[in-house]
Image (cartoon, rainbow, N blue to C red):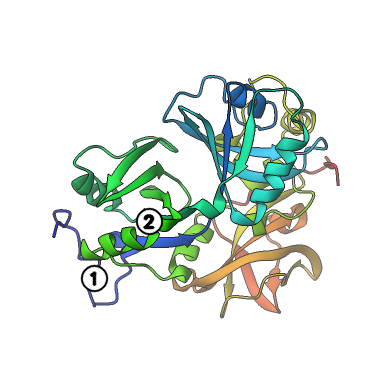
Amino acid sequence: MHKPTGSPSPTDPSGVDPLRISVAWADLGQRGVILATGEDALPFVDKFTTASLATLADQRGTEGFFADARGWVVALATLLRTTDGLWIDCDAEVAATLRDHLDHYHIRERVAFHDASADHACGAIVGPHARAWLEQRLGSAAPAGPYDHARRRLGDVDVMIVRIEWFGPEAFLVQSAASAGPALRSWLAAEGLATAPAVDVEALRIEGRYPAARDIPLKTLPQELGRTAQAISFTKGCYLGQETVARIDALGHVNRALALIAIDGPPPPPAAELTCDGEPAGTITSSCAAPRLGGAACLAIVHRRGLAAGVHLRVLDRAARIVGAAPHAAENQEGPR
């Protein structure tokens, strides 16, 4: 059995969290997988995402928003350039909506969309030693840049490995055929890789401020979600929803922003109200236990009144605070609602 030199054992019974100090496997269940194939796949999809795909090379990827004509987010996705076209990864609950959204505009272009979500099993290798652990088993370099990807074999299983940013700086998405999922998990266990509890994986995502589909309510604008640098190009050609995105960029701000919020006590339920000096300021969309923050961590899209310095935030009548610098919000501009 291999172990990264100098790293704690992922099966150490001392109670340490391997996701944060070593390496572990995160079972992600089913994710959305939309395959766009055909010679027009890349230029067609480029007209419907905030990401720039024109110069995206094979085995490279990017984050991108898909928006409707009003600029409201349909989905946040990872777009991977492959020899066959594009592999679009998203949360499973929005896969059908995103596929229908793209197919709605498809007329004569030589492109086909296939929702392959049910055909794949998905997990991630996560933690500070994830790269070392993975490269020892691959016998070669793992994908280096954000959303770089490669087809490899782990044990006897063919997989797609993607470097992701959802769970911290060292994390790799691993997609296999659904039928090969049990064999892959057995091989990982035989190699000594612990499986992290789902709640610990969710905590990494929340504390890293990466929005899941449930954190993106209806009528949300791309710049409200804190992924502008990673997911929006301001130099590409025209795309659906661009007018709204460009207008917000010109004005320099939005009225709401996704924020990480710490509160006292246990995690609040989804849909719990965030108040600012007694007035509604947002709704909790994700939450988890966060001992490092003194109680619980939550994500919410917070109105500008809740982002100002010196205000008093509460959730379920418990004290709350924004973690890190408050996201920039507008003083005057009202985006479309």
Q: Secondary structure at mark 1?
A: loop
Give the residue type at disc 1. Answer: Thr
Question: Of 165 and 261, which appears nearest the observer?
Answer: 165
Q: Position of residue 168 (x, y in %)?
A: 42, 51
Give the residue type at disc 2. Answer: Ala
- Marks 1 and 2, how far apart at CA: 24 Å
User: Of circles 1 and 2, which is in front?
Assistant: 2
Residue at horizontal 51 percent and vertical 52 percent from the top: 119
Question: Of 52 and 128, which appears nearest the observer?
Answer: 52
Question: Of the numbered discs in the image, which one, if any, rests on residue 75?
Answer: none
Q: Which residue is mark 1?
A: 11
Q: Is residue 43 left or right of residue 165?
A: right
Q: Is residue 58 left or right of residue 326?
A: left
Residue at horizontal 29 percent and vertical 76 percent from the top: 15
Which image quarter: residue 191? bottom left
Which image quarter: residue 215? bottom right
Q: Position of residue 151 (x, y in %)?
A: 35, 38
- Quarter holding the N terminus is bottom left
Say whether residue 296 is visible: yes
Say whether residue 328 is visible: no
Q: Position of residue 34 (x, y in %)?
A: 58, 42
Q: Which residue is mark 2?
A: 180
- 207 is higher (above) or lower (below) than 75: below
Which image quarter: residue 111? top right
Neighbor class of circle 2 (other Cα within 10 Å; few <14, some 14-19, many 20+) is some
Q: Is residue 231 left or right of residue 12?
A: right
Q: Earlier in the sequence, mark 1 or mark 2?
A: 1
Q: Secondary structure at mark 2?
A: helix
